[in-house]
Amino acid sequence: MNFIEQIIEEDIRQGKNDAKVHTRFPPEPNGYLHIGHAKSICLNFGIAKKYNGKCNLRFDDTNPVKEDTEYVDSIKEDIQWLGFQWAAEFYASDYFDQLYLWAEQLISEGLAYVDDQTQEEISKGRGVPTASGIESPYRNRSVEENMDLFRRMRAGEFPDGSRVLRAKIDMASPNMHFRDPIMYRILHASHHRTGDKWCIYPMYDFAHGQSDSIEGITHSICTLEFEVHRPLYDWFCEALRIHHPQQIEFARLNMTNTIMSKRKMLQLVKEHHVNGWDDPRMPTICGLRRRGYTPEAIRNFAETVGVAKRDNIIDVSLLEFCAREHLNKVATRTMAVLDPVKLIIDNYPDDLVEEMDAVNNPEDPEAGTRKVPFAKELWIERADFRENADKKFYRLSIDREVRLKYAYIIKCTHIVKDEAGNITEIHCTYDPNTRSGMPDSNRKVKATIHWASVKHAKKAEVRIFDRLFAVPDPDNCEEGKTFIDNLNPDSLKIQEGWVEPELTLEKVMKIKYFQFERLGYFYADPDSTEEKLVFNKTVSLKQ
């Protein structure tokens, strides 16, 4: 049990909020969700489920300049893909009328005023935490003048940036958020839901707590950067005398070799360092989905990371471990050769084609078996042969035996090279008595390698991904450089390989998750066509 659950269980024990639990997930629709949001989703929806409560989805759409329905749709898709469903769908814009009335209430009670200062003047006037700020020259306007100006702001009489509405709290507070925070700013911008109805928009701190209150949220769970905002959250609820949810903060997720800033991710996309928000190298949920991570793996990762009170950095290898754990259980096995060299079995009949029985998933007996065609000429991985092998190399070499997976034991006799000295053919003989069910099928050799029939295998494009950034902390840059300079130039390699012939477009898009035996876990990319299958490498078989 984490510390948030302890707080909730104590609230239930005391009968607080009628012993009900109501959470919410409140993303701003200004970008795609990432793995950090996934942790918050799992926490908010998971707590609601654990305590038979509800979790709302509420879009914090208070900045029309940056928000779009594209992001709204992607967020809903990501949440449902992770396995959650919201009790109700809301938008902060649903409450614009009520928020405006509450702003007028605070003006009428002398708790808010219209300020004509520029943003630069306001920032300068707030000062520093160790010294009091300077009160605005407009701070003591009359209620009547403030109300008139605020209504004229709403009516569109003033240009952007010319005036703001500020709460009148305490310019000497050590908490900078208490130094007369801005409640409304003028933005003559069309909103994706309300159109041109409004030209003034509430700030996050004025909209968030009140939105929680309207929805009857009991526990407003957010990340640690909002801890300093909590006194302001409380102040607005108390000043307005409305339902007061409890804000609880937890440590956000930080992960090595990646970034979690929407602004920086947007830069990566706009400058074409990646191929869109769903690039499999991105930490976005849609990127992880396209790479081949399963919802179960991400939920398990969030649970394993847990809920902490202090920020820390999680090694990305933990996420990869969670992916392996689940994919090992569900991924369909198949054989693929990604760096091929031709293997010719000289004593195998020229026209013979056999069908070898292969196991679809040894972790799932109900997954059954499949037939894999076997013939005289095969593709094997170039790395599975070494011309001059030492004693620690157990795979194929001249005069050495290995087993071909699901098939026979072979022995290399000689090789053929081109003019540049590259191996073009590996020749061998096979022992026909070593296939499963034959007299010598149990004869032991030190290695087993995979293969694909030259005559039958299907060509595929395989995208091999590495960490997007070459260093654990991309934001830790040398002077004069940015996080862009820490990009890994080898984060994507594209290879052409050979896969089993039974992998049709319809089949791979239905199965999606594969283990290329001995190579790693792969995912069928949506770019796949009948003419060319495309697979993304999710993770290796071992760390």
Image (spheres, rainbow, N blue to C red):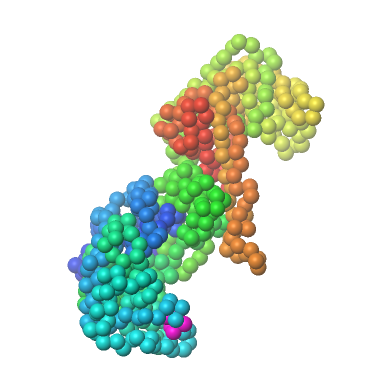
In the image, residue 446 above or below residue 155: above
Could you tell me if residue 416 is visible in this image? Answer: yes
The residue that appears at 46% across and 78% down in the rendered structure is 120
Count of numbered circles in the view: 0
Q: Position of residue 198 (x, y in %)?
A: 28, 65
Looking at the rendered image, the quarter that the N terminus falls into is bottom left
436 left or right of 98 in image: right
In the image, residue 211 above or below residue 466: below
Q: Nearer the viewer, residue 149 or 490?
A: 149
157 left or right of 35 in image: left
Magenta stretch encompasses residue 276: no
Q: Quadrant of residue 484?
A: bottom right
In the image, residue 177 above or below residue 94: below
Q: Nearer the viewer, residue 165 or 465?
A: 165
370 left or right of 185 in image: right
Magenta stretch encompasses residue 124: yes
